[in-house]
């Protein structure tokens, strides 16, 4: 039981329940099931991309280009849909994933082969990809009436009252839970983040791992690009600007160590859900949307301080236990 | 290294040092700078014009003023991505004060003070709890700009005293030299002396190379980092004064996205993002490379987003270049001579 309380995910979960309780006390309509489905819809894309970001942060890197690559893949498929409306929707999805994989693998190659630190690589590709979006669309929008019906409706198409957007994000969560926890490569990702040098001595191929995480993150981001553009029924050069920070925030709130080595998918999903709940609650209790950014910043700082303090306490407890046993 | 091998042929040593200068980062930057100038003046007849060149500095000197303390931050192995948000925060506070009828002197004091306070807050959280700077400044980046949005919403402050306009629009005497430019050069010299000629500067490099070793050799690591973050805040406040004075208004999205361009400038200037390496001269050249590159592209009507592609490519290529050159360079030139 004590161990449970020391888990970050559990604390975050308690905290989320606390917020739900507090808000629904003031506005009972917050508790409606429809409202929760709305929140899930709003956070589905964020939690998917945040899982990609998680893998990169776990290896000790960071990806600042996710917002731009999301926009680039979204814009590409939106234009494709506009000029070739005949292409079936599942081809569109595959193409968006392929574009994402390509953009991610460029990041991965620059980091693993050219040995440019991840923050610099993605800082550069962030501008480059964002610029390419502008070049592609020439500064204009692809708006709802230029997209086909099937394209626009896809994320909202629902089965048993739950949208395909949510199903897709659950699929991604399960796939990556298996990948990160049960496959050898998944465990190697954690190994690299824990100790780069030690992991190479035990035979982990650092270059390969770095390449894989950036490429996979790119793939998820590419899919998210299509979902984003279809859901909001608009593709423009400013799509998802600043989104990279939200994904990093979801990771940090979910207890992912920014220096690498630790972090779980459940934590990240809870982190994204937490952000969604806070935004939703703010509108529910009639707080101006201008407060959103400040509150997001405050939560990030608060979450990191809590994480760090708890970590240190846990380490001290472990040390004490060890010295006691000796 | 040369001192150890007193028997070496002096001519050979001179040859080597000349070769080393050739490969030095600043030389490469200077070369890029000259290339940019030549290409620009060929593309547009308006580039090599004294008035134009002086006036274009307005567009990047405010970023340059933040790039100076950012060199210290990055050499320490930290990073600060909240600087642009600090600009917004200071600018909003100055706007509020100006609305309340505070004079120019008071506005400057408020700008500098709020900037330093924000920087101090960053540094305090980072050093007190031992949290990586990127995580903390990521949060404060949202927080500071968020406060600006809370105060201003979709409105803007536009009322500033007339004398306040001097800082961002004024020239020195009757010359065409902007006040901002002179201020930047004075600051660059001060920061350069501190970084390269004082104990403080040596300590900054020591922290960046190995902060644990630095602490064990008696350097107050956390106090120095706290000072550096506070000074970064102070300079952001100063940049906020210049920018607010230049455009004469404050909106919450002021200086949006500047942090990335500032970090790009510093890294292009040869400061290692992993810390421990860098110098002021390289960054000053890189400031002018990016500034003039953007000016030149603006003259031939390149859209801003396309400029960003070129800046991004420049950043990545610039970082890849030393690795590529290392491969081209004759291997172990020193060990050959020793034999």
Image (tube, rainbow, N blue to C red):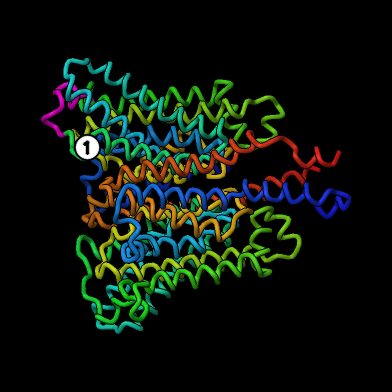
Query: Residue under mark 1: which chain is it in?
Result: A
- Against B160, residue B35 (above or below) is above
| Residue visible at 45% across and 69% down in the picture | B184
Assign the magenta stretch its main secondary structure: helix
Pinpoint residue A222: horizontal percent, then vertical percent.
35, 28
Residues A78 and B16: in front is B16
The single residue placed furthest to the left in the displayed view is A145
Residues B320 and A210: in front is B320
**Is B81 in the magenta?**
no
Q: Does the rendering let one see residue A306?
A: no
- Against B140, residue B96 (above or below) is below
Residue B88 lies in quadrant: bottom left
Pinpoint residue B18: horizontal percent, then vertical percent.
68, 50
Q: Is residue A80 left or right of residue A8?
A: left
Q: Quadrant of the C terminus of chain B?
A: top right
Q: Does the rendering let one see residue A152?
A: yes
Look at the image and give the residue range highlighted in magenta.
A143-154
Q: Secondary structure at mark 1?
A: loop
Pinpoint residue A159: horizontal percent, then vertical percent.
23, 21
Which residue is denoted by mark 1 in the rendering? Answer: A138
Pinpoint residue B151: horizontal percent, then vertical percent.
27, 66
Q: Is residue B213 left or right of residue B174?
A: right
| Residue visible at 23% across and 38% down in the picture | A236
């Amino acid at each position: 039981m004590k161990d449970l309380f020391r888990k970050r995910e559990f604390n975050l979960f308690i905290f989320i329940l606390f917020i739900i309780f507090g808000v629904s006390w003031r506005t009972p309509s917050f508790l409606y099931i429809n409202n929760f489905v709305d929140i899930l819809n709003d956070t589905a894309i964020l939690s998917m991309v945040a899982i990609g970001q998680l893998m990169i942060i776990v290896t000790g890197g960071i990806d600042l280009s996710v917002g731009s690559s999301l926009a680039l893949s979204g814009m590409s498929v939106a234009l494709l849909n506009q000029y070739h409306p005949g292409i079936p929707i599942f081809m569109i999805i595959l193409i968006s994933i392929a574009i994402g994989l390509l953009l991610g693998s460029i990041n991965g190659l620059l980091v693993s082969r050219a040995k440019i630190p991840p923050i610099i690589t993605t800082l550069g590709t962030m501008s480059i990809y964002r610029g390419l979006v502008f070049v592609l669309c020439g500064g204009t929008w692809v708006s709802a009436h230029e997209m086909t019906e099937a394209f626009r409706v896809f994320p909202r198409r629902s089965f048993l009252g739950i949208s395909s957007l949510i199903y897709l994000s659950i699929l991604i969560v399960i796939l990556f839970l298996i990948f990160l926890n049960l496959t050898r490569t998944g465990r190697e990702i954690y190994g690299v983040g824990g100790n780069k040098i030690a992991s190479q001595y035990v035979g982990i191929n650092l270059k390969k791992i770095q390449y894989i995480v950036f490429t996979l993150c790119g793939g998820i981001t590419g899919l998210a690009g299509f979902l984003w553009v279809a859901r909001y029924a608009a593709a423009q050069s400013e799509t998802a600007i600043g989104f990279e920070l939200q994904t990093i925030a979801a990771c940090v709130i979910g207890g992912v160590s920014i220096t690498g080595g630790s972090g779980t998918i459940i934590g990240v999903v809870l982190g994204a859900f937490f952000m969604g709940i806070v935004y939703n609650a703010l509108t529910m209790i009639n707080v101006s949307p201008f407060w959103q950014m400040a509150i997001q910043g405050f939560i990030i700082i608060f979450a990191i301080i809590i994480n760090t303090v708890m970590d240190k306490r846990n380490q001290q407890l472990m040390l004490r236990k060890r010295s006691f046993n000796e | 290294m040369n001192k150890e091998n007193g028997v070496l042929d002096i001519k050979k040593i001179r040859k080597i040092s000349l070769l080393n200068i050739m490969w030095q980062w600043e030389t490469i930057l200077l070369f890029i700078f000259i290339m940019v100038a030549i290409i620009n003046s060929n593309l547009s007849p308006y580039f090599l014009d004294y008035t134009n060149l002086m006036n274009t500095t307005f567009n990047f000197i405010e970023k340059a003023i933040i790039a100076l303390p950012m060199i210290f931050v990055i050499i320490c192995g930290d990073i600060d991505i909240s600087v642009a948000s600090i600009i917004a925060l200071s600018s909003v506070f100055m706007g509020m004060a100006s609305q309340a009828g505070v004079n120019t002197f008071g506005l400057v004091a408020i700008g500098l003070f709020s900037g330093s306070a924000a920087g101090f807050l960053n540094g305090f959280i980072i050093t007190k709890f031992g949290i990586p700077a990127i995580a903390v400044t990521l949060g404060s980046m949202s927080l500071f700009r968020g406060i600006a949005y809370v105060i201003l919403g979709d409105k803007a402050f536009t009322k500033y005293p007339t004398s306040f306009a001097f800082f961002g629009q004024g020239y020195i005497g009757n010359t065409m030299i902007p006040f901002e430019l002179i201020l930047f050069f004075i600051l660059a010299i001060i920061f350069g002396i501190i970084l390269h000629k004082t104990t403080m500067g040596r300590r900054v490099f020591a922290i960046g190379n190995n902060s644990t070793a630095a602490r064990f050799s008696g350097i107050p690591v956390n106090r120095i980092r706290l000072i550096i973050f506070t000074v970064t805040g102070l300079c952001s406040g100063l940049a906020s004064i210049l920018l607010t004075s230049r455009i004469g208004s404050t909106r919450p999205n002021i200086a949006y996205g500047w942090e990335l361009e500032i970090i790009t400038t510093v890294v292009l200037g040869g400061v290692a993002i992993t810390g421990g390496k860098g110098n002021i001269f390289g960054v000053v050249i890189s400031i002018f490379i990016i500034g003039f590159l953007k000016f030149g592209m603006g003259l031939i009507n390149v859209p801003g987003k396309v400029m960003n592609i070129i800046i991004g490519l420049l950043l990545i290529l610039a970082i890849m270049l030393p690795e590529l050159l290392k491969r081209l360079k004759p291997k172990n030139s020193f060990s050959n001579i020793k034999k």
